[in-house]
Image (spheres, rainbow, N blue to C red):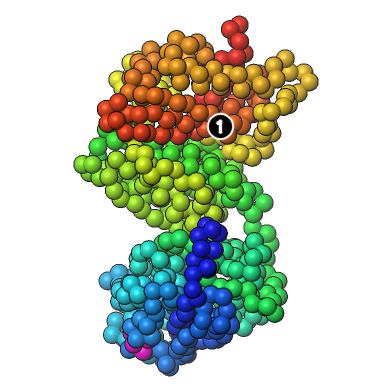
């Protein structure tokens, strides 16, 4: 992502257009806020310093405060002022005040200064109108960045029982590619105003980030995701976990601001309030730790249920390639959920999992829609979401696109290697591979002992349970002295035999590597191998752990072949986890942990 940002920054400087709106003094006294207007002024002052630098020739600002903020003034400023942005320009909207929802109609509004709890329908600005105006601006500008601080539920509760704070502004704004939104708090949370800062916590974090604190890599440039990530972390820290900003990113990251000489981050205030004690889960959740759940089929067509497991496997495989992430085993989640009667958030907190990826899909004809959501385990609130839709022929491309979107929402750099765009998905081949590996039940399924259907994934640096794993590099032995097991290279030898047997399509040799290889899986593997012309199998990214007398090995398997039915090249990747046990025949694969 940094590469993308540098590429954008290298283009001829454009112009920055900022519309900053803040309403503290409402016509209805009960609605008044303390620092919304001051926040808008401060944001404008900070971004004006970007003028004449490497990114922007000019910074145009328009600030509307208190009584100046009417529905008509917002519409005119959006269409005439922000609408002046050109293809190489960036348009920014900062909006601080009340965002409300009418419980009876479900309609959403931003409240300008004259709006009250009785005239909001006529004096307020519908979020649908704001969305449409942002779409128009986006069509002319290179990018649109929106910062919303509209969740002040306390004042609303006192003013009106039939209105509630706007719960999810990101869901109301869907401008498309090149749209970046940062909201001050998640649904159900209060956006805090701080007397010790004379600002809102959200604005304070933005200003601190623009002053240089968000420049994580020290290159004196701040990308959108660097800023969003810094604000999210800082506000949560300032409010002791009571407020969590969240973002919506549509498009490639880019350099938004430069750290000017003489800039200095603001001093960090002490956390205050009744919640000043540490977050009880803060020490448990590993940074950038994630677990993926099986995707749910939204249609009543059981023949496609297996796709939910395939998506879980695919997401785990892609996420495991990201070095900044710790990806937890699906087996861990499934077993713990069974033990805790389906208490998903309790399981995530117990195991120290920071984020959960959940999702759903639906298939109609040859079209698939996939929705994915990031859930923050501490609060149970949704941190971000996205969806993709397209042909089943593009299954892998679609799921990879969705994975990359989620990574951006987690403020994690997207891997540079994104795979070959010339290779098509083959769902039939993927299903056969998963069935032959025991990740799915083979078709038809003869009577045999039931096996779990969830894919298995080892965390990189985390236990399958609660104690940290000792993860060994497989280049050197690392066994305890009393263990009668051979060195780790024996495990690599088993994987090499596994790879060679598949590449040679030697079913007998492959079956001999297993303690038990059922006939139905053998038949499924035969069908898979028959369809895979010029098969090449690669094994990489191997991790191992000793558990008692057994060895658990996790590895990435990559199959490259030409599909006999279509004549097209196919690449399939799956991350697998297997138990190795010592038998009279030597070390063999005994299935999944």
Q: Please state the horizontal and vertical placement of residue 412, each as a whole percent of the image.
A: 54, 54
Q: Residue furthest left?
A: 365
Please give the name of the residue rendered at 67% of the width and 22% of the height, measured from the top-left corner. Answer: 488
Residue 100 screen position, x and y as percent: 38, 75
Compared with residue 66, is residue 442 higher up or lower down, i.e. above or below?
A: above
Q: Residue furthest right?
A: 481
Q: Which residue appears at 58% of the width and 34% of the height?
A: 541
Q: Residue at x 51, y 52 (%)?
A: 414
Say whether residue 94 is visible. Answer: no
Residue identifier under label 1: 540
Work out whether residue 126 or residue 164 is closer to the camera in this orientation and state it.
126
Q: Is residue 215 left or right of residue 452?
A: right
Residue closest to the eye, 346 or 439: 439
The residue closer to the viewer here, 34 or 202, is 202
Q: Is residue 64 magenta?
A: no
Tag 1, which secondary structure? strand
Tell me if mark 1 has few (under 14), some (14-19) or many (20+) residues whose alpha carbon lies within 10 angstroms of its own: few
**Residue 571: x and y, percent?**
41, 34
Residue located at (54% from left, 17% from top): 497
Q: Which secondary structure dominates the residues rendered in magenta?
A: helix
Residue 466 position, x and y percent, is 63, 38
Can residue 394 be seen here? The reply is yes
Number of labelled discs? 1
* Residue most extreme to the top: 584
Quarter that holds the C terminus:
top right
- Judge whether residue 74 is colored magenta: yes
The answer to which quarter of the image holds residue 326 is: top right
Give the quarter of the image for residue 264. Answer: bottom right
Magenta segment boundaries in residue numbering: 73-77
């Amino acid at each position: 992502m940094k590469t993308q940002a540098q590429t954008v920054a290298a283009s001829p400087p454009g112009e920055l257009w900022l519309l900053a709106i803040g309403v503290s003094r409402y016509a209805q006294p009960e609605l008044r806020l303390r620092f919304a207007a001051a926040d808008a002024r401060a944001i404008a002052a900070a971004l004006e310093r970007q003028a004449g630098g490497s990114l922007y020739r000019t910074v145009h600002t328009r600030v509307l405060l208190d009584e100046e903020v009417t529905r008509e003034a917002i519409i005119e400023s959006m269409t005439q002022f922000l609408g002046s942005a050109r293809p190489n320009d960036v348009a920014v909207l900062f909006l601080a005040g009340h965002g409300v929802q009418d419980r009876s109609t479900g309609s959403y509004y931003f409240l300008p200064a004259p709006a009250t709890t009785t005239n909001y329908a006529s004096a307020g600005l519908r979020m649908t109108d704001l969305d449409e105006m942002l779409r128009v601006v986006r069509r002319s500008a290179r990018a649109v960045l929106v910062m919303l601080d509209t969740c002040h539920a306390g004042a609303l509760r006192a003013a009106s029982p039939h209105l509630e704070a706007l719960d999810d502004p990101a869901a109301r704004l869907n401008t498309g590619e090149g749209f970046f939104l940062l909201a001050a708090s998640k649904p159900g949370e209060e956006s805090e105003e701080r007397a010790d800062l004379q600002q809102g916590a959200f604005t304070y974090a933005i200003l601190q980030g623009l002053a240089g604190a968000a420049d994580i890599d020290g290159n004196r440039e701040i990308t959108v995701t660097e800023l969003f990530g810094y604000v999210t972390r800082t506000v949560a820290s300032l409010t002791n976990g009571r407020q969590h900003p969240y973002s919506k990113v549509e498009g490639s990251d880019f350099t938004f601001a430069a750290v000017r000489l003489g800039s200095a981050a603001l001093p960090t205030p002490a956390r205050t309030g009744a919640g000043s004690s540490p977050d009880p889960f803060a020490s448990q959740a590993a940074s950038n730790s994630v677990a993926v759940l099986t995707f749910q089929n939204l249609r009543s067509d059981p023949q496609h249920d297996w796709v939910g497991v395939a998506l879980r496997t695919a997401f785990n495989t892609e996420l495991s390639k990201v070095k900044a992430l710790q990806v937890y085993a699906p087996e861990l989640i499934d077993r713990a959920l069974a033990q805790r009667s389906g208490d998903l958030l309790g399981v995530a907190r117990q195991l120290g999992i920071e984020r959960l990826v959940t999702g759903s899909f639906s298939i109609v004809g040859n079209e698939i829609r996939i929705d994915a959501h990031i859930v923050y385990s501490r609060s149970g609130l949704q941190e971000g979401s996205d969806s993709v839709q397209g042909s089943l022929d593009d299954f892998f491309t679609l799921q990879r696109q969705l994975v990359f979107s989620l990574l951006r929402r987690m403020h994690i750099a997207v891997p540079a290697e994104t795979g070959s765009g010339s290779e098509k998905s083959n769902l039939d081949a993927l299903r056969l591979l998963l069935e032959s590996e025991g990740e799915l039940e083979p078709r038809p399924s003869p009577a045999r002992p039931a096996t779990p259907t969830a894919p298995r994934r080892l965390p990189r640096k985390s236990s399958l349970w609660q104690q940290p794993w000792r993860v060994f590099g497989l280049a050197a032995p690392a066994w305890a002295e009393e263990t009668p097991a051979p060195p780790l290279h024996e495990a690599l030898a088993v994987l090499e035999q596994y790879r060679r047997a598949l590449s040679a399509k030697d079913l007998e040799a492959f079956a001999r590597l297993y303690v038990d290889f059922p006939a139905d899986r053998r038949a499924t593997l035969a069908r898979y191998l028959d369809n895979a012309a010029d098969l090449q199998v690669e094994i990489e990214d191997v991790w191992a752990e000793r558990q008692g007398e057994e060895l658990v090995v996790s590895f990435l398997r990559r199959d490259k072949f030409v599909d006999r039915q279509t004549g097209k090249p196919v690449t399939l990747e799956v991350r697998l986890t297997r138990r190795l046990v010592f038998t009279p025949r030597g070390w063999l694969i005994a299935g999944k942990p």
